[in-house]
Amino acid sequence: MSANRHLGRIIALQTLYEFEFRVDCDDKDVAIKEILARNIARYDRSVDDTDFIKELVAGVQAEIHNLDARLQPVAPERPISQIARMDRVILRIAVFELLHRKDTPAKVVINESVELAKSFGGENSSKFINGALGALLKEIDPSQARPAAVKEERPE
């Protein structure tokens, strides 16, 4: 199940990233449902929880302004528009999950987001994502101290 959810998050990430990119390029023919259907079809033999993917994509789209408003205070040095597109999309998916998917533990959401950042983001993306989501989690649920997210390796 978790490997399937991981793939689901990748598909949601690809879909939301492509949609935002095409909107920013003034693509008048862009349709998120078409992008989502194509991306799900690409992995049809590997993914069986398409409802999860559709919920992530639709939820992020519907809540985008609220998600950004929740993110801005935890990353005040970087306005949302200046965060790298990939990082921004990963953060939005994670915040949506933290706020609306109570069946997924916060630690899992943060770890998955860090892994997505390592796979698809820039050199420092995983550290930025981990820090921003750790700070947000403290705000959402003060009883949860910073979870044991993926630890960054430090050279000795």
Image (tube, helix red, strand yellow):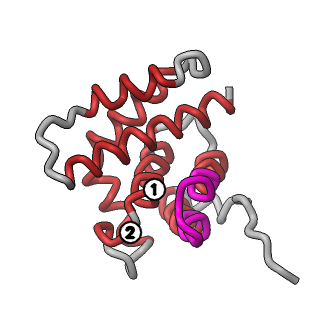
Q: Nearer the viewer, mark 2 or mark 1?
A: 2
| Residue 135 seen in the figure | no
The image quarter in which residue 75 lies? bottom left
Q: Which residue is mark 1?
A: 91
Quadrant (top left/top right/bottom left/bottom right) for the C terminus: bottom right
Determine the residue positioned at 53% across, 24% down. Answer: 43
| Residue 101 in picture, x, y percent from top left | 50, 37
Tell me the chief SS of the magenta region.
Answer: helix
Rendered position, 146 above or below 109: below
Give amino acid for label 1: Leu
Q: Which residue is mark 2?
A: 83
Q: Residues within 10 Å of mark 2 (few under 14, many from 20)?
A: some
Give amino acid for label 2: Ile
Q: Which residues are magenta?
A: 115-130
Q: Secondary structure at mark 1?
A: helix
| Residue 6 seen in the figure | yes
The magenta stretch spans residue 116: yes
| Residue 9 in picture, x, y percent from top left | 52, 38
- Whether pointer 2 and pointer 1 mark residues with C-beta atoms closer than 8 Å, the reply is yes
| Residue 82 in picture, x, y percent from top left | 33, 72
Q: Residues within 10 Å of mark 1 (few under 14, many from 20)?
A: many
How far apart are the two marked residues, 2 and 1, measured between alpha carbons?
A: 10 Å
Side of 65 relative to 71 (left or right): left
The image quarter in which residue 145 lies? bottom right
Q: In terms of sequence position, does the residue under pointer 2 or pointer 1 come before the other?
A: 2
Rendered position, 133 above or below 17: below
